[in-house]
Image: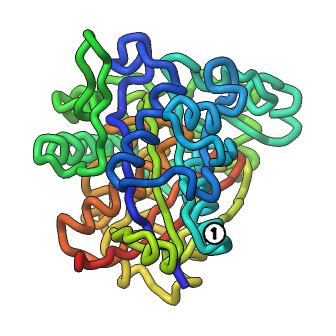
Amino acid sequence: MSALIIEALRSPRGRGNDKGALRSLKPVQLLASQFSALAERTGLDTGLVEDVFVGCVTQTGEQGAHIGKLALIQAQWSDTTPALTLNRYCASGLTAVALAAEQALACDGLAVGAGVEMMSRVPMASDRGPLTHDPEFARQARLVPIGLAADAVATLEGFSRQQCDAYALSSQQRATNARAGGYFKSVVPVHLGEEGGLLLDETPRPQTTAEALAQIAPAFAGAGVDVIADLSRHCGLAGLNHVQHAGNSPAMADGAAAVLVASPAAAKRLGLRARGRVLTVANASVDRTLALTGAVEASRRAMQRAGLQVADIDLFEVNESFAALMLHYMKHLGVAHQQLNVNGGAIALGHAMGATGAMLVGMAIDELERRQQRRALIAICGAAGLAVAMVIERLEAP
């Protein structure tokens, strides 16, 4: 039996800096806006929700103190609705949806998977954890900056700067086209009072050109001689080819998302029409030093559990951790570029860390419906080798 996806909503992504359109909102307000929209669109009695799982990576300051439950209060959901805020690095949002699906089936009821990250107000690593702020621990554990790990993957695989830039350019072009074409049906506009609001993702850069990308300096070449030397030795390389830069890396973003799931019986009892269903979920953890290659293994496991192969999947929505990692994903799974991130990804649309995985669920369902296709695989990796993948299936409207 599979959990049903009743609705999947997300905010537009705002730039994750002091010029971002969403920056005037607090994280709790942004997440609450998605909870409110979810209840309104589905006619949901929030007191019937068994649990709410919320991904958030940097749980400090305005994103601390269990922001998941606090956002439910802000959205005026029933006090009887419990919540859990969780951190699986960048895979947090998709893990939240996976846990919600499991909970809905276990309780024969409703659950919500969600995510939030406002990087304009709570910058990445501002929680000052050992991953980023304990050099001795990082050195002993062989944990390197993830952009440097992306450079190592590019070097191991022989991916050139030009190949990475070409992928990044396509992400920008696809996202720009999708935004202009109104493909993102899951987007809930965010209203900002007298300041207006944000109706669409503000992160894509339609003016991007191959020539402009070629002029951007590598971002991780200055990581430190010792760090680069240790990483090179770990990978059996003489040195690293630094191909990743601001233009072919994920853009920092603000965003939130919420996905309502139900057991089949609960959906029938409550008269809720499902848009799709979760076929399988798989978690993985791989080499912690190269870190971001885990989406490949998680995807393989998810397809195997569903009894499917790459040829059985119509669309792949994979978080664009870095351009080199997308090239790695296509190479090792045999996925064609025309099936992968067909409406752009985090390089263009931005990466709101704790929310992105949940956002990808809505993006995948939107595109399956638009194309009248059947299945999508959603995958996302995180620091220290973590990754999650989910296979979903569109349901025909009655």
**Residue 324, visible in the rendered structure:** no
Residue depicted at 57% across the width and 56% down the height: 49
Residue positioned most to the bottom = 307
- Residue 297 in the image: above or below residue 91: below
Quarter holding the C terminus? bottom left
226 or 373: which is nearer to us? 373
SS class, disc 1: helix
Query: Where's residue 15, x and y in %?
Result: 37, 24
Residue 92 x, y percent position in the rendering: 61, 48
Q: In front: 188, or 349?
A: 188
> Residue, x 52% and y 25% (percent of image)?
27
Residue lying farthest left?
181
Q: Quadrant of residue 146?
A: top right
Q: In the picture shown, does residue 369 fall above or below 291? A: below
291 horizontally vs 116: left or right: right
Image coords of residue 116 (percent x, y): 52, 36
Residue 187 seen: yes
Query: What x and y, as percent, mark residue 379?
Result: 50, 60
Q: Quadrant of residue 227?
A: top right
Q: Nearer the viewer, residue 285 or 17?
A: 17
Which amino acid type corresponds to the residue marked 1 in the rendered image?
Glu
